[in-house]
Image (tube, rainbow, N blue to C red):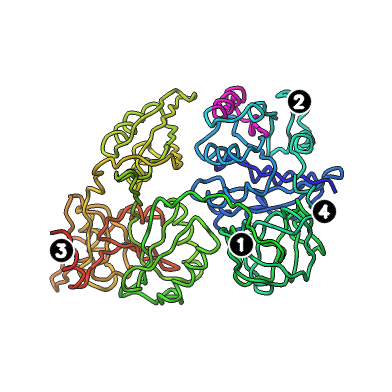
């Protein structure tokens, strides 16, 4: 069968997964009357809740005798480790751009990877039926973006379509019939080249593993594109590392191809096919699966280095072990190692003592998703504040810089610019009106300056601002960046909080807990209104006497406490504080060091 392999690229919430739903529906992948969930490709619970694609997933549709393998790529740069490998499997990309917002930072990140690989893009201007859509402006911005990313002449001469993924139509003209997606199917078949591998069917079998998954019955499953030759079920092959060193020999127990939303077993895979194979025990992502006669590994895409690290430790608070079942450091280490094996953008290393683990990754969102998945699996953890990783370049200390794109109402732009270019050491590179009373600000800001800024940004913009960020590069160390100015309120007693005590503490600052909640000594229960930490007693009840009062007591009415999300809590804490994460609670606490560690830090400071 005629074959095409294509990846769909888009910024977060530009409608990529919704468009794939319509491609599946109109190609006949679903039977008539079949109940299919909205955003069918977002199979992960977290993806559905947050409305973002975290894991790259493959699907396959048939259109007039052509099989089209479609790869849904993550839209966020924190999950870029997936993107870089996935693009090596395809021969073309479909770039989806919101006609109102235009190309955004995550679009730029993934598109730069695709253009560097020489892939010719198709541009789809989505949501052109929105009242604030400006498709012509968005198209000009896409061309400018390609030119800025050093696209060649073939890539700059890209075809484009106007579409509405939710309504299920795409047309070559803005005033087209708006009936279905046949124009997009036609363009994919005519513009995306056939896999070049199809002419190398008679060579020895090779395949580059791009994603790893697990099945309770099949064990490890590696997915990738067959580069050369054929592979039959039951054949004996070997796995080679990126350096060409042999890892293991194994018998292929099953070959599966993507058909619609599911996978079907097939007897033989040929060059150009995207398939999943099982049977290996050690082979992993970026390894080459090859016939026994092959000694040379396929080139694997280099992965951008991690930019932040977080320390994962056991939960050693007085409330440890009440919620979760997985609390031992050994179990936490096994889970983190398993994650690092599947996700090449994450690095895990042991800390001295072996009770905690240093996890390095791309960004706060990637760390937040990992921690959220672990707490749902029953883990209890203590998490440190993210630390930015630095590197030495020509003897000079460099730190990661991020490109920040902000859309904000005109009235709030001054406050945003002051915060970014002042204490957070950013440099503004562009500022222009974005229409509808909004201003677009583009700035280069150290990653350190963005830790904990998002909550402050929402406060400054009254919740109306939109902030997007993407890794830009490395630059010399920018100097000190002030952290959180306010101190915290720390519980001095263990027990259950009392409404009367919290009512009296409200004048000291904002609270993070309500009445009748478990607290312990050292737990952070609120933010102090001043810059110093304050120990308080949230258990102190009202003194009762046997003297009757002339009037009845005033009812205690508490202000609704501030509740942090996981990412907000991690960004809020200081270096001497921890986030306690359990399946049902997120708490903040002070990190109390043992005497030996305190002496060691004091000597280091001297």
Q: Residues within 10 Å of mark 3 (few under 14, many from 20)?
A: few
Q: CA distance from mark 4 to mark 2?
A: 28 Å
Residue 355 lies within the magenta run: no
Circle 2 is placed at which residue position? Answer: 176
Earlier along the polypeptide chain: callout 3 or callout 1?
1
Q: Which residue is mark 3?
A: 602
The residue under the point 43% across, 76% down is 330
Q: Nearer the viewer, residue 536 or 309?
A: 309
Residue at image x 25%, y 60%?
Answer: 576
Q: Is residue 232 above or below residue 16?
A: below
10 Å crowding of disc 4: few (<14), some (14-19), many (20+): few
Can residue 242 be spotted in the picture? yes
CA gap, disc 1 and disc 2: 42 Å
Question: Magenta stretch?
Answer: 121-147
Q: Which of pointers 4 and 1 indicates the residue nearer the eye?
A: 1
Closer to the camera, 164 or 552? 164
Query: Disc 4 or 2, which lies upstream in sequence?
Result: 4
What residue is disc 1 on?
Answer: 212
Q: Is residue 453 visible?
A: no
| Residue at the disc numbered 4 | 31
Residue 398 percent coordinates (x, y):
33, 44
Rounded to the nearest angstrom, the CA distance separating label 4 from label 1 is 30 Å
For label 1, count other residues whose C-alpha is less than 10 Å away and answer few (under 14), some (14-19) or many (20+).
some
The answer to whether the residues at label 4 and label 2 have Cβ atoms under 8 Å apart is no
Query: Secondary structure beneath disc 3?
Result: helix
Q: Quadrant of residue 382?
A: bottom left
- Please tell me whether mark 1 or mark 2 is closer to you in this view: 1
């Amino acid at each position: 069968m005629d074959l095409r392999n294509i990846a769909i690229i888009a910024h977060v919430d530009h409608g990529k997964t919704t468009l794939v739903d319509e491609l599946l529906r109109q190609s006949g992948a679903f039977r008539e009357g079949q109940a299919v969930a909205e955003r069918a490709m977002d199979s992960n619970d977290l993806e559905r809740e947050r409305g973002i694609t975290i894991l790259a997933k493959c699907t396959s549709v048939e259109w007039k005798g052509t099989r089209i393998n479609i790869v849904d790529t993550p839209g966020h740069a924190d999950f870029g480790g997936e993107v870089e490998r996935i693009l090596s499997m395809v021969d073309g990309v479909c770039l989806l751009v919101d006609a109102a917002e235009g190309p955004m930072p995550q679009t730029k990140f993934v598109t730069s990877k695709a253009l560097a690989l020489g892939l010719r893009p198709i541009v789809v201007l989505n949501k052109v039926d929105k009242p604030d859509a400006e498709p012509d402006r968005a198209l000009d911005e896409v061309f400018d973006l390609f030119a800025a990313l050093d696209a060649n002449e073939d890539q700059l001469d890209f075809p484009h379509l106007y579409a509405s993924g939710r309504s299920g139509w795409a047309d070559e003209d803005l005033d087209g019939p708006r009936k279905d997606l046949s124009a997009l199917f036609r363009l994919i078949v005519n513009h995306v080249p056939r896999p070049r591998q199809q002419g190398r069917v008679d060579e020895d079998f090779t395949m580059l593993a791009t994603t790893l998954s697990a099945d309770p019955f099949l064990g490890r499953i590696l997915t990738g594109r067959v580069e050369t030759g054929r592979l039959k079920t039951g054949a004996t092959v070997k796995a080679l590392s990126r350096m060409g060193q042999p890892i293991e020999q194994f018998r292929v127990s099953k070959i599966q191809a993507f058909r619609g939303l599911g996978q079907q077993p097939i007897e033989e895979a040929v060059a150009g096919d995207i398939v999943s194979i099982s049977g290996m025990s050690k082979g992993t992502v970026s390894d080459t699966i090859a016939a026994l006669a092959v000694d040379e590994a396929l080139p694997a895409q280099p992965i951008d280095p991690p930019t932040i690290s977080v320390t994962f430790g056991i939960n050693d608070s007085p409330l440890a072990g009440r919620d979760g079942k997985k609390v031992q450091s050994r179990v936490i280490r096994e889970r983190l190692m398993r994650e690092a094996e599947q996700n090449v953008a994450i690095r895990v290393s042991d800390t001295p003592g072996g009770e905690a683990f240093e996890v390095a990754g791309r960004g706060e969102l990637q760390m937040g998703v990992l921690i959220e998945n672990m707490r749902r699996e029953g883990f209890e953890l203590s998490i440190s504040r993210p630390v930015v990783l630095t590197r030495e370049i020509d003897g000079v200390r460099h730190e990661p810089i991020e490109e920040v794109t902000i859309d904000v109402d005109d009235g709030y732009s001054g406050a945003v610019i002051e915060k970014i270019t002042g204490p957070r050491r950013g440099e503004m590179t562009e500022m222009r009106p974005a229409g509808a009373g909004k201003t677009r600000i583009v700035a280069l800001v150290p990653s350190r300056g963005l830790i904990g800024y998002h909550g402050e940004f929402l406060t400054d913009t009254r919740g109306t601002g939109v902030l997007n960020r993407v890794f830009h590069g490395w630059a010399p160390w920018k100097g000190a960046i002030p952290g959180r100015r306010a101190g915290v309120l720390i519980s001095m007693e263990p027990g259950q909080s009392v409404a009367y005590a919290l009512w009296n503490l409200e004048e000291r600052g904002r609270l993070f807990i309500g009445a009748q909640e478990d607290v312990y000594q050292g737990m952070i229960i609120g933010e102090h209104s001043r810059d110093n930490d304050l120990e308080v007693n949230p258990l102190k009840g009202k003194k009762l006497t046997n003297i009757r009062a002339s009037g009845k007591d005033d009812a205690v009415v508490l202000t609704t406490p501030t509740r942090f999300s996981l990412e907000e809590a991690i960004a809020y804490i200081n270096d001497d504080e921890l986030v306690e994460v359990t399946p049902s609670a997120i708490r903040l606490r002070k990190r109390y060091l043992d005497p030996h560690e305190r002496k060691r830090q004091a000597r280091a400071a001297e």
